């Protein structure tokens, strides 16, 4: 079974990953009928480094980020075995 690591995935990519992980658990474990996940939807904002003549605000160029203190909701998934 894999471990869900913090990455820069979009919320929809995280939902797809949760679905794949839960489906894999159900497929490999006949006694499991349902799997649920609830993960914080964390955001990281690019730091404005223009005072140092560095472009860090464009999505493709950003390398330095500041985490937002509180999660912006949760990403949840529940996958159940067909009955």
Image (cartoon, rainbow, N blue to C red):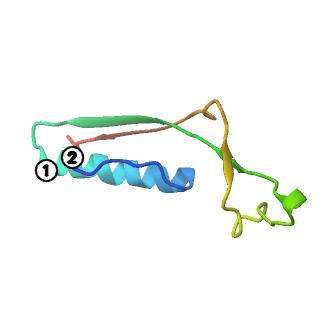
Image spot of residue 7 (x, y percent): 49, 54
Q: Residue at x 23, y 42 (%)?
A: 81
Q: Which residue is mark 1?
A: 28
**Quadrant of image for the C terminus:** top left
Question: Within 10 Å of the Cα at label 2, are there few (<14), some (14-19), or many (20+) other Cα atoms?
Answer: some
Report, in whole angstroms, how far the alpha carbon at label 2 lies from the one at label 1.
Answer: 5 Å
Q: Is residue 21 left or right of residue 7?
A: left
Which residue is at 34% across, 35% downward?
Answer: 36
Residue for badge 2: 25
Report the front residue among 72 and 7: 7
Residue 77, located in which quarter of the rendered image? top left
Label 2 close to label 1 by CB (< 8 Å): yes
Q: Residue at x 20, y 45 (%)?
A: 26
Outermost residue toward the front in this view: 52
Rendering coords of residue 40 (x, y %): 52, 35
Task: Name, please, the residue furthest toward the bottom.
Answer: 60
Tell me the tag on residue 82. Answer: none
Local SS, label 1: helix
């Amino acid at each position: 079974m894999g471990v869900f690591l913090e990455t820069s995935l979009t919320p929809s990519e995280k939902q797809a990953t949760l679905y794949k992980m839960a489906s894999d658990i159900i497929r490999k474990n006949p006694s499991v009928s349902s799997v649920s996940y609830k993960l914080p939807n964390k955001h990281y904002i690019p730091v404005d480094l223009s005072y140092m003549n560095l472009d860090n605000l464009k999505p493709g160029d950003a390398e330095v980020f500041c985490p937002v203190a509180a999660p912006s909701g949760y990403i949840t998934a529940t996958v159940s075995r067909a009955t």
